Amino acid sequence: MENEKTGGVRAAEHRPLCLCILAIGALFAWWNLYHDDGFLFLSNYLNQVESCLACYGGALGAFALIVGARASWRRRERPWLIALAIAQALTGTWLFIAVMADWPAGVIGGQLFIGTAFFSQLFFLMRWLCTRPVPHIAVAIAVAIATYGVLEAAAWAVMALFPLMPLRIAVRFLLLALCIVCSWRVLWKRPVSAQNGPEASPFASAETDKSAPRRLPPQLLLHCAAYWLIFGMTHAMASGIIPLGHDKLLPCYIGSVVAGGIFCVAFARDDHAAKLWPRVRTTIFPLTMLSFLLLSLANSGLTFISIGFAQCAMDAYLAFYLLATIVVMRKVHCSYLHAAATATLIAVPFIVIGVIIGDVLKVSVPLNTESYGTLSILAFLLLVAGTFWVGDDRRVELVWGLEKKLTPKRFEDKATTERCAKAVEKFGLAKREGEILLFVAQGQNAAAIAESEVISLNTARTHISRIHRKMNVHNQQELLRRLKEP
């Protein structure tokens, strides 16, 4: 009987997570189908830059909308969800009218507004998801990416078998309805109580940052810039090499499903999710580099594989980027709004720049074997710099996780700090020994000090031994008593 109750509780706990996965998958499928419309159904509409500026520019529009109205959406979640649903439905209808009228400006405007609504709703869903354990988040993102590929492939199959405009509209609006219904049940079905902890409300634990934001290290900025530039270039160059059509979309959908599987295997375990950067070096880096190399084989009978790999690499990195944003948020104890805004402001400009570079290259440079060889070398050097510059695993965690070294300045025990300062003067300790003394006074052992200060265990032990000798003590207990002496 108790096992049945336990199983029921677990099912009730996992049901919102499954609905969130389905909502994110349907949302991505809805948005991407309209992104594809700009290339499949408009004559002479081959400029990738305008479409990407519209689609990804929607992220900046969503950021401005949420920041400007953050006080409103905290108090009025239900009206915001209804408004986003209406805005997406109206904009989707407008975009179809622009497509049928062969009006490029209307298509670009429609993609911009759909992108704004898409990223706004994605923000709400990811903000709810960030209250879950990191392995659960990794699984949810992986399955959501795979679900997006499956749903879009199903929509593509229906529209390919029955190429009717009313059916095309109906399929898209079914995806939107699925997303809205699942979002409603996940985010606002249960009553919100501030006393039930962060799990009760996805909005209760988000605004917890009371400290000044930390400056992002240059290694992390280089990493994001390198990958989003490469993906932007790949996206633009693939559109110039491979003829547009439904035969190009199927490998993209399959690539999304495969990306979800790869990401789940690489990041969904407890120990894997805790070490993001080593997983990037062993999974994301080779996948990205291979996708760029295979792009040169697109016209030699490997079009399906080339496009599939490109989509797989980009979606796998997108999944990692979403997960890393939440991990960084938790590491630095900032709000999800701050973390998501930073991630958006880093990613969007660089992917747009990459698209512009790729668009210029495919127009001005003959994409032959020699030019691809040069581009591949440059891409490899850029990815290596963005992936391996930071050094060993411990320094990698300090950079990517934004973990500050545990320095004496972070201790808040003023009395202990004052005692240690007096001991430094009284016993003639060096500056570095004074810093280590404060760690020891706070109960840290040699191993913890070595890890916090990124030094070897022998070095930490040497510092402690010198402190003991100068203070004429033999262990930590004697040292603590000596510190309390007047």
Image: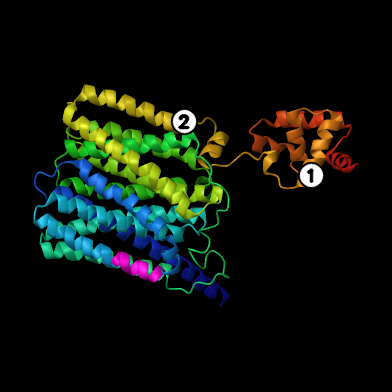
Q: CA distance from mark 2 to mark 1?
A: 40 Å
Residue 459, horizontal then vertical, whole percent: 71, 28
Q: Residues within 10 Å of mark 2 (few under 14, many from 20)?
A: some
Quarter of the image for the N terminus: give it. bottom right
Checking the image for residue 14, the label placed there is none
Q: What segment is highlighted magenta in the picture? A: 77-85
Looking at this rendering, what residue extends furthest in the bottom direction?
Answer: 1
SS label for mark 1 = helix
- Quarter holding residue 386: top left
Rendered image: mark on residue 416: 1
Q: Quadrant of the C terminus?
A: top right
Residue marked by disc 2:
388
Frontmost of labels 2 and 1 is: 1
**Image side of residue 305 versus residue 486, left or right:** left
In the rendering, at what x and y percent does residue 414 appear? 76, 46
Q: Does the stretch in magenta take in 84?
A: yes
| Label 1 packing within 10 angstroms: few (<14), some (14-19), many (20+) | some
Splitting the image into 4 quarters, where does residue 419 fall?
A: top right
Q: Secondary structure at mark 2?
A: helix
Amino acid residing under circle 1: Thr
Q: Position of residue 263 (x, y in %)?
A: 40, 47
Q: Is residue 69 left or right of residue 164?
A: right
